[in-house]
Amino acid sequence: MRETSSFPLLHTRNYQLRRIVPADMAAIFRGLSDPRVTDYYGVSYETLASSQAQMDWYEQVWLDGTGIWWGICSREAPEQLIGTCGLHGWEQEHHCAETGFWLSPDHWGKAVIPECLHVMIGHCFRHLGLHRLQAMVEPENIASWRLIEKLGFRLEGVLRECEYKQGRYVDLKCYSMLATEYTSA
């Protein structure tokens, strides 16, 4: 089990990436109950109480050493969570993990995620010892796959009908970035 006090606090020019805390539960619920956010996201919640499962997951992946998720906040209002980003499926033996993110629609179109992911990815490669970071994106989620392509992720292929969601099978575009590609970017 991991020491809880060593959670890394990250800063960008405009944002702070911090540990997700119990006081963030209402913001997590607002984001992960909004169909505009959850349309292409893996989870959604119908009640505030049910979103406790997501709060527990954020904490558990950190404690287990299988992931780390940050709450995204503006530097001026670090108590107001506007989204999250992080990694899961962290295979420490193989130095690889999968990344993901979501952002409140009020903050879309403001380049929040590119700014935050750039810093997060750098931290993962420089300080967490990752060699490979991958992202799985539904082909219809054009904004997300364009964003990760701009960050330097490379398309490896499409996993056909690999996920069952909302009564149908969906494809996932598989992207990756290696530590050597990040440092040369």
Image: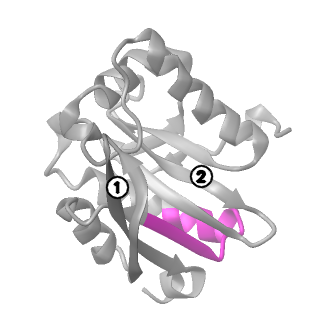
Residue depicted at 24% across the width and 43% down the height: 39
Residue depicted at 33% across the width and 18% down the height: 46
Q: Position of residue 75 (x, y in %)?
A: 36, 37
Residue 169 bears which disc, if any? 1
Residue depicted at 61% across the width and 70% down the height: 125
Residue 116 placement, left or right of 106: right
Residue depicted at 45% across the width and 20% down the height: 51
Q: On screen, 24 above or below 78? A: above
In this rendered view, identify the residue nearer to me: 140 or 123.
Answer: 140
Q: CA distance from mark 2 to mark 1?
A: 22 Å
Q: On screen, 179 above or below 44? A: below
Furthest residue to the right?
Answer: 1
Where does the magenta region start and end? 121-135
Q: Is residue 17 magenta?
A: no
Quadrant (top left/top right/bottom left/bottom right) for the C terminus: bottom left
Residue 121 placement, left or right of 124: left
Q: Is residue 74 visible?
A: no
Q: Is residue 67 visible?
A: yes
Dot 2 crowding, Cα within 10 Å, few <14, some 14–19, many 20+:
some
- According to the image, what is the colour scheme of the structure? one colour
Quarter location, residue 93: bottom right
Which residue is identified by label 2? 88
Quadrant (top left/top right/bottom left/bottom right) for the N terminus: top right
Circles 2 and 1, Cβ within 8 Å, touching? The answer is no
The amino acid at mark 2 is: His
